Image: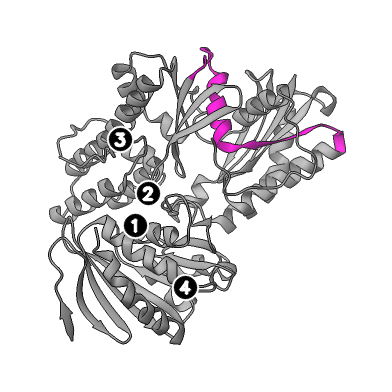
């Protein structure tokens, strides 16, 4: 079964075709990151206009890449939320029009659920029950997955999401946007020697990164003039604090819940320090989506669409955007 | 200037006037408690403008406002998406201008539907867009004093907010109850 996935929830216009929820036949992403970099993040109006310009060429390219015709497709999956309303609307309306024109079933997809299904596109397939850590610019959620489509949210961020903490930290250190890769690059050869706070929020599985950000700000203020090696050390210390909290709290929850695997998902899952820390601390297998599939893409949407379709969850052509959609 | 000191571990009233109230908070919980009182008193179309640097307690205060509006979750930072919506007794529109450095970018956001809508609008980093924001508002200036202390100054602009501040005063005694 071949599913066409469409993703426009934020700043990537993406379309992909995936077979049986695991084999990528084509995967096209038009990133707006350069356009948004000067704003230090996504600007909704700009994002929405860019999606309108790029969505049709991106669909054509995805079809061309695989050399397929519409008759070879079985369904269309499209992200309906969470995300920016103006961006989601572009993808959902185009997907509806295409589905109607070619008489294909339409499946509305939860973007957070799709991030998890990126793990089905790797070589090692997930097993249930597993604990998913979704870490991105807008979310830091711990979700227990007991089967296809069976999610239970265990923890969430109370203030800044992990990706957002990276963005703010990078801004404080003058390292640019997107903050995650900028901090990771600056930290690569540095020792995390500064003492920065970790919010453990004992007795629960929620996260908090706001206090860490404030501590970094005052560390920078106290320093005055910043030089490269000091910034590198601060970036390494900041990254280490985020990694420590994510790894420790995830492993604690995984042990308590008795899961068989840990799945990472979302843009921050691409952070190498995070992956390395999980690999060295976890007794359980830790799965990370293949390179390029942690950040927003449509292959994960198509994969998720396959499993939704298999369980009979098809939406009518009246599907609408749900900007504040959550998972579990 | 009327000054009252309520002890180091309680919210402290540094100064109080008709259109002005200055408080010292000693913990995130105290900042949230002030927010909860504001949320309870809030009406549709209210605009709360929050000004203050990173880590001064803006999101923390907004969490309290959300709880006061019977929102059953933590309002978390909208910096990444610029606006988050919550639904309690009234809709809460949580706007964050942190990433926007040019007034034209803010003008392009289409904030009017939130600012003049059917809910309560809380704007973080309001200092970046003051000329574009409603002139009638409750302006809350937050600043970092020490690791555990934040100063919060409430200024009212317009009769609705003077009335709000008057109703807030009887609420103040609930902040320090255990």
Q: Residue A88, position in %: x, y?
A: 64, 47
Determine contact: label 2, label 4, CB under 8 Å.
no
Residue at numbered disc 4 = B47
Between marks 3 and 2 in the image, the one whose residue lies nearer the viewer? 3
Residue A11 visible, this angle = yes
Q: Chain of mark 4?
A: B
Determine contact: label 4, label 1, CB under 8 Å.
no
Q: Is residue A63 above or below residue A214?
A: above
Q: Secondary structure at mark 3?
A: loop
Q: Is residue A26 above or below residue B134?
A: above
Q: Is residue B111 magenta?
A: no
Quadrant where the image shows the C terminus of chain A? top right
Question: Gap in Å between the C-alphas at discs 4 and 1?
Answer: 17 Å
Residue at numbered disc 3 = A203
Residue at numbered disc 2 = A159
Label 1 packing within 10 angstroms: few (<14), some (14-19), many (20+): many
Residue at numbered disc 1 = B60
In the image, are marks 3 and 4 on the same chain? no
Instruction: Give the residues drawn in magenta, as a range.
Output: A101-129
Q: Residue B169, position in %: x, y?
A: 31, 77
């Amino acid at each position: 079964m071949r599913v066409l996935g469409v993703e426009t929830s934020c700043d990537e216009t993406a379309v992909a075709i995936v077979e049986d929820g695991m084999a990528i036949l084509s995967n096209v992403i038009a990133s707006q990151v350069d356009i948004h970099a000067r704003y230090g993040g996504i600007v909704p109006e700009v994002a929405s206009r860019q999606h309108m310009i790029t969505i049709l060429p991106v669909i054509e390219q995805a079809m061309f890449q695989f050399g397929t015709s519409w008759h070879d497709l079985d369904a269309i999956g499209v992200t309906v939320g969470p995300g920016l309303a103006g961006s989601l609307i572009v993808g959902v309306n185009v997907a509806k029009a295409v589905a109607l024109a070619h008489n294909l079933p339409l499946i509305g997809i939860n973007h957070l659920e799709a991030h998890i299904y990126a793990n089905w596109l790797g070589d090692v397939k997930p097993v249930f029950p597993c604990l998913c850590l979704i870490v991105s610019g807008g979310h830091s959620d711990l979700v227990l997955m007991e089967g296809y489509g069976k999610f239970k949210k265990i923890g969430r961020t109370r203030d800044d999401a992990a990706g957002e903490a990276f963005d703010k930290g990078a801004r404080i250190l003058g390292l640019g946007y997107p903050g995650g890769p900028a901090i990771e690059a600056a930290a690569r050869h540095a020792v995390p020697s500064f003492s920065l706070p970790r919010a453990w929020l004992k007795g629960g599985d929620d996260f908090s990164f706001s206090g860490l950000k404030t501590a970094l700000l005052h560390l920078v203020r106290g320093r005055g003039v910043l030089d490269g090696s000091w910034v590198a050390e601060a970036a390494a210390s900041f990254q280490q604090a985020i990694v420590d909290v994510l790894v420790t709290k995830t492993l604690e929850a995984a042990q308590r819940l008795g899961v068989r695997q840990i799945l990472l998902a979302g843009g921050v899952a691409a952070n190498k320090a995070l992956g390395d820390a999980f690999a060295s601390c976890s007794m359980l297998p830790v799965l990370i989506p293949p390179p390029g599939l942690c950040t927003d893409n449509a292959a994960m949407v198509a994969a998720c669409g396959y499993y939704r379709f298999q369980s009979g969850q098809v939406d009518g052509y009246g599907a609408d955007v749900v900007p504040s959609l959550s998972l579990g | 200037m009327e000054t009252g000191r309520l002890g180091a571990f309680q919210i402290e009233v540094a100064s109080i006037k008709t259109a002005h109230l200055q408080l010292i908070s000693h913990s995130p919980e105290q900042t949230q408690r002030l927010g909860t009182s504001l949320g309870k008193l809030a009406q549709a179309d209210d605009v709360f403008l929050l000004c203050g640097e990173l880590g001064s307690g803006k999101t923390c205060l907004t969490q309290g406002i959300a709880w006061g509006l019977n929102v059953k979750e933590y309002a978390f930072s909208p910096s990444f998406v610029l606006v988050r919506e919550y639904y309690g007794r009234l809709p809460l529109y949580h706007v964050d201008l942190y990433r926007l450095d040019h007034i034209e970018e803010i003008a392009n956001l289409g904030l009017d539907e939130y600012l003049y809508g059917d809910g309560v609008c809380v704007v973080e980093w309001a200092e970046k867009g003051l000329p574009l924001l409603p002139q009638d508002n409750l302006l809350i200036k937050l600043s970092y004093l020490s690791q555990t202390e934040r100063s919060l100054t409430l200024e009212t602009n317009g009769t609705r907010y003077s009335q709000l501040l008057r109703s807030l005063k009887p609420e103040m005694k609930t902040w320090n109850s255990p």
